[in-house]
Amino acid sequence: MINLKKLTMQTVNIILIAVIVILSSLGNTRVAIAQKPKQPEPEKPLLDDFSPNPLFSKESDPLLPSPPPDGQVLGQSQQQILEPELVKLNAEATGLLVAGNIPGAFELWNRELRIRRYFGLSQEIAALNRVGLIAWNNSQRLYIKFITERLDQISQKLNKEKINDLQLWESLGLAFKNIRAKNSALSLYQQLLETANQSQDSLAQEQYFNEIAQIYMMWLDYPNAAQTYEKLLELQQEIRAIKGDVLPPPTQPATPENPNPTPPPSEVRSLQQLAFIYEQTGEYLKAISVKERLAGYYANQQNLLPIPEIKLGIGWNYEKLEQFEQAGLTYQEAYSIATSIQQFDNASEALGRLGKLYRSQNQIKTALDIYQAQVLVNQQAYNYYGMMNAYDQIGDIYLSQKAYQSAIAAFQQGLGLAQQLKYREDYFVKKIDLATRQMNR
């Protein structure tokens, strides 16, 4: 007979064991699920020319999860809270750049620049300028493009809303110039120049002409630079006629925001730049005309010190034009002025060029006399190097005339100086040997 009580207890025990096994299995499953490693977040794709400008993005940022509506600025207290965080962001980006992680660095700077939009235009432009300079110095063309587009957007906003904040406009111009956005920078400074023309502010006109000319020079656009400097000179002469000689403003020191400040405008600098341009473009007659004006300016100021070097430049321009007689007269003038103010280096340079000029024209006796005079000038200046070179020229002339004894004597003088200088000693030994062998043939 079956014991029902015993059977029931066995059944209950089996059921309990099954439940425990099932629960244990579920527990292990939960542990396995809990211990399953997280999948890494997919990397953000690198930006390219076809990517939307990240500076135009309206996405929220962990530092500013609820930004104000576009066009509105954060309150002062909110800005003060965020400022240290943005400084940290900039520092982290700089660290990534140094480590070679350029995309990572600019991703952080893009975040900073997006948040700076809510700090007002002045702070945003300053930040765009700073990061733009970093992009330029590291040849990051794509990020320069993004920053240029944002600066252009700001420029359009200022024009549309007729904002006449001069400091804002000038900081925008500086940013365009620093990232080499030529057309945008020129357009902005032309606009500022037109405003200055309307208000008849001659000093502001001078400043903006100077900036425009500097931009053309940065791009080696010499024709437009020359045209701008010519207009600037006309204006500067008008200013001088009305106000007399005015000292130029002091040169601005280089700063991180403006590492290459435009030199302050002055009539002298405009003439110097024009002379340089005309030499670069091979327009030597124009270069001579400008340099004569520059020498005349200094003469009127009773300042002879810069004139010998200017005259040397004019003589070289005449040589390029193959007007050798005029070149010789100019070098003589340079020598005369240089000796009168004891500029012996420039006096020696003038004689050296004169000697070379006369020798090229086969006026040997005159060339020899000039090099002998050059020795004396260099003696006065204790210029042993100049004396050595002059004796070298004298020796060569005598050698070409087969006056071997005189050639050897000149080369020996040169060797003595070379030994004192410990320079070109072998050269003069070989010259003496050459002259001796030719003499003994």
Image: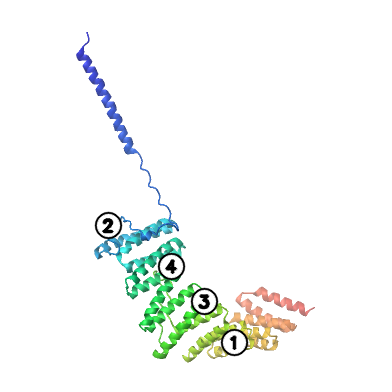
Q: Real-space Cα distance between discs 2 and 3?
A: 51 Å
Which residue is at the far right? 441
Q: Nearer the viewer, residue 62 or 337?
A: 62
Secondary structure beneath disc 1? Answer: helix
Residue placed furthest toward the front: 160
From the image, tell me which residue sits under label 1. Answer: 377
Between marks 2 and 4 in the image, the one whose residue lies nearer the viewer = 2
Q: Residues within 10 Å of mark 1 (few under 14, many from 20)?
A: many
Q: Name the residue under label 3.
A: 222
Residue at 52% x, 77% y is 223
- Secondary structure of residue under mark 3: helix
N-terminal label among 1 and 2: 2
SS under mark 2: loop
Q: Could you give the CA–CA distance between mark 1 and mark 3, rounded to whole angstroms?
A: 39 Å
The residue singled out by tag 2 in the image is 66
The x, y position of residue 364, in whole percent, is 70, 86
Asked which secondary structure carries label 4, the reply is loop
Specify the amino acid type for callout 1.
Val
Q: Please name which of the two marks, 1 or 3, marks the residue nearer to the observer.
A: 3
Disc nearest the viewer among 4 and 1:
4
Residue 165 sits above or below residue 387 on the image: above
